[in-house]
Amino acid sequence: MILDARRLDVAIGDKLFCRGLDLRLEAGACLAILGRNGAGKSTLLSVLAGLRRAQGGEVRIGGMTLPAADGRALALQRGYLAQHQHDPFACQVIEVVLAGRHPHLTRWEWESATDRRIAEQALADVGLAGFGPRQMQTLSGGERQRVALATLLAQQPSLYLLDEPLTHLDLNHQIAALDILARLAKSGAAVAAVLHDPSLALRYCDHALLLFGDGEWRAGPSHEVLTAENLSRLYGHPLRRIEGANHPVFVPE
């Protein structure tokens, strides 16, 4: 079991986002987390990543209990993509992506040629081959998002936690990013991503978690959880499922 969350209570102040959540991800699982704005998706993901304490219950990653786990040991197991990307100082793209290799290095060890090859391959995987020498400040929002994903790929964790990984991406890059996540799961990693499109969630993720924003949640196989009835209640607007040629889609009434 890569991720094991039991009886998890997550809140900010007196706002309870989920109560008694039980969530387990094994190797090869791909989970979509959906809910309205402000339903606690990002807060829950930060708890699962060990960046925020839960109000109750426990989270284990690779057998390590959070947030007490050693930081480096945790970084070798868990990768986290934040919702917003920041450039605190000027640097090259390759330097940002190489930061994903730091958990694999000792305190004073420099990146090796192998680390650089892994970073360059990660950039190629997200369609940014040759971008290594570019300055981060020269990139578009979508390019910065893809650099952040490349950094996570270079880290090579067994658990990927991604908060809105499709932010700023146009359609072709959204599909390319989701294809990458699907390949990661097929290769034996576990993936959990906050998504906003239930049609894409159903297409790419075998499990889904719905957060209703009042402590209630629903989780299970995507084909059971992602129904027009559940999603209409989740978003507060009627949705209809349409059977497409290859993949079903949900559209508003």
Image (tube, rainbow, N blue to C red):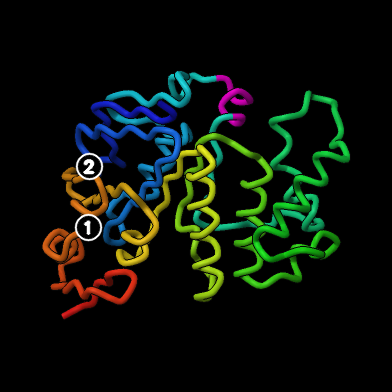
Quadrant position of residue 59 = top left
What secondary structure is marked by label 1?
loop
Residue 91, position as x, y percentages in the image: 81, 56
Residue 5, position as x, y percentages in the image: 33, 29
Type of amino acid under label 2: Leu
Q: Which residue is mark 2?
A: 16
Quadrant position of residue 48 = top left
Q: Residues within 10 Å of mark 2 (few under 14, many from 20)?
A: some
Quadrant occupied by the N terminus: top left
Which mark's residue is nearer the viewer, 1 or 2? Answer: 1
Q: Are marks 1 and 2 in contact (CB under 8 Å)?
A: no
Q: Nearer the viewer, residue 3 or 106?
A: 3
Instruction: Give the magenta range.
Output: 70-76
Q: Which residue is mark 1?
A: 226
* Membership of 72 in magenta stretch: yes
Q: Main secondary structure of the magenta part?
A: helix
